[in-house]
């Protein structure tokens, strides 16, 4: 449960990373106190992202960077053993919409975020994007 709490703490705040630079994301993740460690930065010209993993490799966090070098959206990929706890937490902490999507708002209500749970064959993903106002 403790590891889940750490995972949720990082994921629950992941919209705070949207709009941040590579260095800001790395620094914020290092200071977050979670079990995620920096794995690699990938920049192919077509894709640019930062990858963080947890020690037991049940969770991977991707920060997808835009052309201007700022975080555009995040993806938390998790093992299916975490699905029920994550769904329960989403339902408890965010406004459920439909079709496995939730809404969240920044504290100052300046930004709105869309949180999507996407089921894949071997894992599920929680994608967080800022809704354009």
Image (cartoon, rainbow, N blue to C red):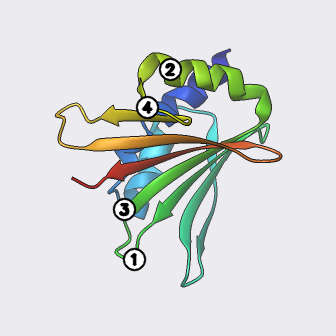
Tag 3, which secondary structure?
loop
First in sequence, mark 4 or 2: give its number: 2
Residue identified by numbered label 4: 97
Image point (26%, 36%), residue name: 106
Binning the other alpha carbons within 10 Å of mark 3 as few (below 14), some (14 to 19) or many (20 upward) gives some
Binning the other alpha carbons within 10 Å of mark 2 as few (below 14), some (14 to 19) or many (20 upward) gives some
Image point (54%, 20%), residue name: 89
Tag 2, which secondary structure?
helix
First in sequence, mark 1 or 2: give its number: 1
The dot on residue 21 is: 3
Residue identified by numbered label 1: 67
First in sequence, mark 1 or 3: give its number: 3
Label 1 – label 4 distance at C-alpha: 30 Å
First in sequence, mark 1 or 4: give its number: 1
The quadrant of the rendering that contains the N terminus is: top right
Coordinates of residue 84 in the picture (x, y in percent): 69, 21
| Residue depth check, mark 4 versus mark 2: number of the one nearer the observer | 4
Binning the other alpha carbons within 10 Å of mark 1 as few (below 14), some (14 to 19) or many (20 upward) gives few
First in sequence, mark 3 or 4: give its number: 3
Quick check: 91 left or right of 2? left
Q: Nearer the viewer, residue 24 or 11?
A: 11
Label 2 – label 3 distance at C-alpha: 30 Å
Q: Nearer the viewer, residue 18 or 31?
A: 18
Coordinates of residue 44 in the picture (x, y in percent): 60, 81
Residue identified by numbered label 2: 91
Label 3 – label 4 distance at C-alpha: 30 Å
Label 1 – label 2 distance at C-alpha: 33 Å
Quick check: 69 left or right of 48? left
Coordinates of residue 49 in the picture (x, y in percent): 55, 65
């Amino acid at each position: 449960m403790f590891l889940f709490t750490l995972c949720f703490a990082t994921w629950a705040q992941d919209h705070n990373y949207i709009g941040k630079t590579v260095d800001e994301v790395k620094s914020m993740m290092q200071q977050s106190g979670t079990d995620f460690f920096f794995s690699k930065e990938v920049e192919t010209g077509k894709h640019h992202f930062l990858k963080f993993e947890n020690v037991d490799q049940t969770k991977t966090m991707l920060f997808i960077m835009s052309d201007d070098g700022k975080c555009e959206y995040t993806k938390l990929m998790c093992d299916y053993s975490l699905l029920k706890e994550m769904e329960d937490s989403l339902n408890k902490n965010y406004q459920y919409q439909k079709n496995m999507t939730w809404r969240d708002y920044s504290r100052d209500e300046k930004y709105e975020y869309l949180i999507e749970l996407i089921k894949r064959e071997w894992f599920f993903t929680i994608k967080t994007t800022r809704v354009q106002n």
